[in-house]
């Protein structure tokens, strides 16, 4: 038996229940993993509320680190005792789990378990945003929402390391301080400042070539208004709900803009893509240019508390659940 956090119906943080499930042996191509640290992400909220569908009852959670305990037939790239981590595989809120071996990446010695659990999903998201979706170049000025959050804190540091000037949107003065520590040259407060006006002031009226917007519906049009002609709007999250339908003529009227709604799932869909992204992430973290801040730690049993904090925007950096 293993302890898990499941939902039996969609709802608020109180929908999360601590259960026990039987633990079988890994099948062909699978391993049994003893999990040591579990990452919390906003996508977990989307599954809990029903914004993203899943079959109920469901064990939530999308990333974790742990130690391989048993191998199924045909697994040759891993061995018992290996330290590994993974992103984007539903079922992470568990002390142990069975998982496909090709969804795992081996952890280098200089990456700790909590660090790994706090960065796989967020860090690989930053990797595809900066290196694939819009390839940030030295001298670019970019706009990043939730700059003090889990993805934002990694993305801003990495963008600075690439030679970009980073404008970070944040929700409070305290988070503005954190964003600047994460590499933001400028910060904008959502609640008190006009985002497009501030971006135009900072860029001498030009606008930015790319906006990384994880907020969703509430900031969508403001984000478009921050872009220069031929700019790229990257909508990669729904913290305030999915973007409402709109007339695509807006993209023409605002400067022949590009719009994309990427997902990490696509960017790690094959083992080769996953390993490539992980190597890039481990290299930048190992270089010391990107630090992974684990700022909140809860027991797995207190997952509902962690969800409530996340939704209240009371967290910074990464949150970890310990089995």
Image: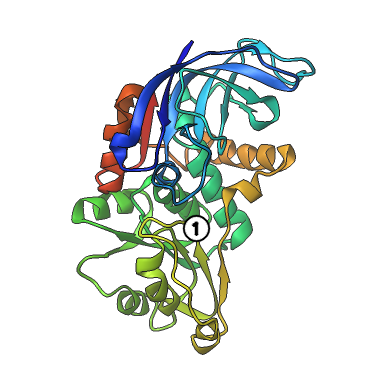
Q: Which residue is drawn at the image coordinates 38% and 30% (left, top)? A: 320
Q: Is residue 283 above or below residue 25?
A: below
Colour scheme employed for the rendering of this structure: rainbow
Q: Is residue 264 above or below residue 13?
A: below
In the displayed structure image, the side of residue 267 where residue 146 appears, left or right:
left
Q: Which residue is drawn at the image coordinates 37% and 75% (left, top)? A: 222
Q: Which residue is drawn at the image coordinates 56% and 27% (left, top)? A: 85
Nearer to us in this view, 166 or 223:
223
Residue 60 pos. (x, y %) = 46, 34
Nearer to us in this view, 318 or 20:
20
Residue 248 seen by the camera:
yes
Nearer to us in this view, 36 or 242:
242
| Image quadrant assignment for residue 101 | top right
In the image as oriented, which residue stretches furthest toward the bottom? 253
Q: Residues within 10 Å of mark 1 (few under 14, many from 20)?
A: some
Residue 291 pos. (x, y %) = 42, 38
| Image quadrant assignment for residue 17 | top left
Instruction: Count the numbered circles shown.
Output: 1
In the displayed structure image, the side of residue 159 where residue 306 appears, left or right:
left
Residue 139 seen by the camera:
no
Q: Is residue 184 above or below residue 272?
A: below
Q: What residue does disc 1 label?
A: 236
Residue 29 pos. (x, y %) = 74, 22
Residue 294 pos. (x, y %) = 36, 33
Q: Secondary structure beneath disc 1?
A: loop
In the displayed structure image, the side of residue 108 where residue 172 appears, left or right:
left
Q: Which quadrant is the C terminus positioned in? A: top left
Q: Which residue is drawn at the image coordinates 39% and 84% (left, top)? A: 205
């Amino acid at each position: 038996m293993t302890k898990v956090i499941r939902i039996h119906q969609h709802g608020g943080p109180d929908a999360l229940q601590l259960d026990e499930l039987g633990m079988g042996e890994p099948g062909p191509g699978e391993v049994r993993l003893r999990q040591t640290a579990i990452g919390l992400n906003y996508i977990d909220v989307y599954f809990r509320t029903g914004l993203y569908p899943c079959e109920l009852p469901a064990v939530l959670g999308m990333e974790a680190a742990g130690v391989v305990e048993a191998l199924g037939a045909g697994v040759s790239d891993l061995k018992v005792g290996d330290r590994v981590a993974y992103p984007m595989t539903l079922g992470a809120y568990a002390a142990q789990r069975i998982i496909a071996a090709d969804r795992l990446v081996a952890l280098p010695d200089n990456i700790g378990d909590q660090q790994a659990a706090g960065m796989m999903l967020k860090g690989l998201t930053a990797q595809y945003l900066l290196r694939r979706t819009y390839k940030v170049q030295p001298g670019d000025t970019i706009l990043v929402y939730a700059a003090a959050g889990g993805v934002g804190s990694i993305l801003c540091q990495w963008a600075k390391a690439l030679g970009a000037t980073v404008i970070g949107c944040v929700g409070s003065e305290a988070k503005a301080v954190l964003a600047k520590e994460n590499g933001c040259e400028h910060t904008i407060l959502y609640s008190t400042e006009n985002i497009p006006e501030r971006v135009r002031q900072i860029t001498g009226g030009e606008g930015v070539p790319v906006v990384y917007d994880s907020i969703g519906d509430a900031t969508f049009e403001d984000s478009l208004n921050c872009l220069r002609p031929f700019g790229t709007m990257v909508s990669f999250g729904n913290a305030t709900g999915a973007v409402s339908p709109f007339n695509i003529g807006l993209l023409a009227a605002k400067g022949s803009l590009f719009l994309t709604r990427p997902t990490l799932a696509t960017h790690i869909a094959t083992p080769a893509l996953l390993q490539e992204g992980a190597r890039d992430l481990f290299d930048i973290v190992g270089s010391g240019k990107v630090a992974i801040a684990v700022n909140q730690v809860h027991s797995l049993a207190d997952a509902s508390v962690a969800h409530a904090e996340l939704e209240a925007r009371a967290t910074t950096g990464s949150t970890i659940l310990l089995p």
